[in-house]
Image: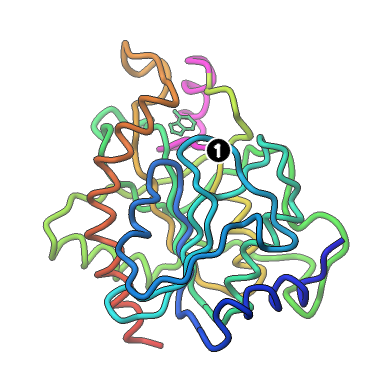
Amino acid sequence: MTSMQETMATIRKYAPNFVPKMGIILGSGLGSIADQLTNPITIPYQAIPGLHSGGVSGHASLLIMGYLQDVPVVCLKGRLHLYEGAPYEAIRTLVRIVRQLGAHTLVVTAAAGSLQPQMKAGEIMLINDHLNFQPGNPLCGSNDESIGPRFLSLANAYDDELRTIMLSVAKRLNILLFEGVYLSLLGPSFETPAEIRMFAQLGADAVGMSVVPEVIIARHAGMKVLGLAAITNLAEGLSSEKVTHEGTLQQGEIAARKLIKLIPEFVKEAARDF
Ligand code: HPA
């Protein structure tokens, strides 16, 4: 097993003195946000011990350090999914790299299907809570007390103050921002219409195959989290269109254009406080 020291030593070789204020995880079809970084230093996941490279098209799998609005940030372009066979260990490493580099805030973005008919493809949903329907928890196994507690509270997991900042940024930029609960599934198959009807009754506003493991790991490490779901489709059964990966990538571009405006402004505003 690779140690965290080995992982960090490799990254430090590329950027010895870089201390990001924030980490940003870019979901499927949302990688173009990383093009906004100035003075970027790029490391492929393959070059980082302890990380497996993701293989889904739309995921480039690069760690990029650079500046957004003059604020130092680290972007994770291409996440690791359980459905690809990525172990929780690698997902833990990916998020803990961000914390070890010095960031205390994590912005998590992901493509998602909408369960609210008025929240259509191309819209953005600010995540205010989650439902974990993945088959496990990324903190299972022995606990490293130097990182965080064995039993973790998930109250305010999607930080109130950061959400307030993002809502005011969206208002200023005149970008409609929905708010709601993200339900996370293992995938890789999309849901059935019957499952979507059940999830709607349980209180889900959007469904996807990520976010939750990373948020739990980040909260465990004491990071504040902001979650943004890029709506790429109405969930299965809510429209006559079948959900496909190609369709989600296409619609992801429309949502990405909004995120390209929202995220840099959010970073600038939020970084004022630390
Ligand atoms: N379901 C699950 N994950 C998704 C969807 C969906 O409808 N759209 C984008 N990611």
Please determine whether, in this image, residue 268 is positioned above or below residue 231. Answer: below
Residue 144's x, y, as percent? Answer: 82, 72
Is the residue 92 above or below the residue 236 in the image? below
Q: Nearer the viewer, residue 105 or 167?
A: 105
Relative to 31, is 18 on the left or the right? right
Q: Give how far across and how far down residue 125 sits, in percent.
A: 33, 47
Residue 272 appears left or right of 26: left
Question: Does mark 1 have its CB less than 8 Å from ligand 1?
Answer: yes
Is residue 195 shown in magenta?
Answer: yes
Image quadrant in which the N terminus is located: bottom right
For the magenta stretch, what is the residue range? 192-208
Q: Which quarter shows the C terminus?
A: bottom left
Name the spot of residue 83 as percent of width and height, x first.
66, 35
Residue at the extreme top:
240
Task: Please name the residue shown 46% across and 57% down the image.
Answer: 108
Residue that numbered label 1 is attached to: 209
Q: Residue at x 52, y 78 (%)?
A: 103
Give 128 or 72, whichever is nearer the viewer: 72
Inspect the image, locate mark 1, and give the three-letter code of the amino acid beneath it.
Answer: Met
The correct choice, above or below, for 102 with respect to 64 in the image is: below
Please name the residue shown 66% across and 61% down the image.
47
> Which of 180/231 is in front?
231
Residue 88 appears left or right of 241: right
For numbered disc 1, what is the local secondary structure?
A: loop
* Total residue callouts: 1
**Which residue: 40% across, 50% down?**
31
Give residue 231's quadrant in the image. Answer: top left
- Residue 162: x and y, percent? 37, 70
